[in-house]
Amino acid sequence: MAPSLIWGKNMRSKKECRKEALARRALMSAKEREAAGRRITDFLRDSEEYQLAEKILVYASYRDEVPTYDLIEGALREGKQVFCPKIEGQAGARTMSFYRIMDPEELQDGFQGIPEPVVLQGRHYETGKNSRDLILMPGTAFDRQRRRLGYGGGFYDRFCRRAQGAVRIALCFDCQLLEELPEEETDIRPERIVTESGWI
């Protein structure tokens, strides 16, 4: 049985919201994206959640997403354990796992061209209830109630249910914030969102 949508007044579909937010994001110039990304990274690195984190689970940015490579390199220099996601399995039964990387060069094109770890043996992240772990979530659209739309695969929602003790923070540009998003019962909200303007 499909999960039920939780609708607000005059709610648009997830597809419509994704389309609008992605179109807005695509209009940002490379210079604007880089400057906004630096501000987001600075806000994040100054946060207690980041400073206390021993393990950082972070996506490797792709195309016009909030950039994460400077963040990854900084966390590695600080001695934090950095884990990046990899999509595994066949169509219809795909899952997302995280693997530790020691260097950004260990990331290569994987599922749908997205950078993924290539060294896997002995590097798997074990989900549990460690409150010092920090998950940095990407997404297509967000609102100020911390609702989040991913890319439609549900990978982060399923993973976050397994990693219940970890802190969840989403990275997004201001232009990706919409007034109100539809939400399903299975959707997982980040505990905080950071944009180039600050925290939500």
Image (tube, helix red, strand yellow):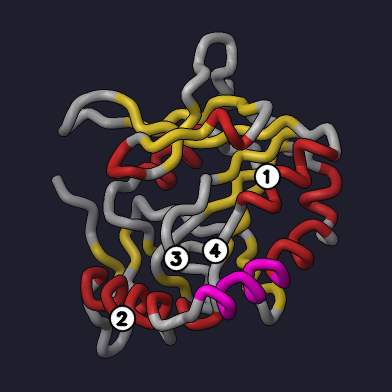
- Please name whichever residue, 181 or 20, is drawn nearer the observer in this view of the structure: 20
Read off the residue under disc 2: 20
Q: CA distance from mark 4 to mark 2?
A: 17 Å
- Residue located at (38% from left, 63% from top): 149
Circle 2 residues within 10 Å: few <14, some 14–19, many ≥20 = some
- Labelled disc at residue 43: none
Calculate the distance from the C-alpha at mark 2 to the C-alpha at mark 3: 14 Å
The residue positioned 39% from the left and 55% from the top of the image is 187
Q: Which residue is mark 4?
A: 66
Say what amino acid the circle numbered 4 marks: Val
Q: Amino acid at mark 3?
A: Asp
- Residue 197 is left or right of residue 96, and the answer is right
What residue is disc 1 on?
A: 72
Instruction: Give the mark, 4 or 2, whose residue is nearer the N terminus.
Output: 2
Q: CA distance from mark 4 to mark 3?
A: 7 Å
**In whole angstroms, how far apart are the C-alphas of marks 2 and 1?**
29 Å
Identify the disc placed on residue 64: 3
Residues in magenta, as a range: 30-39
Q: Nearer the viewer, mark 2 or mark 3?
A: 3
Q: Main secondary structure of the magenta part?
A: helix
The answer to whether 164 is drawn above or below residue 152 in the figure is above
The outermost residue toward the top is 122
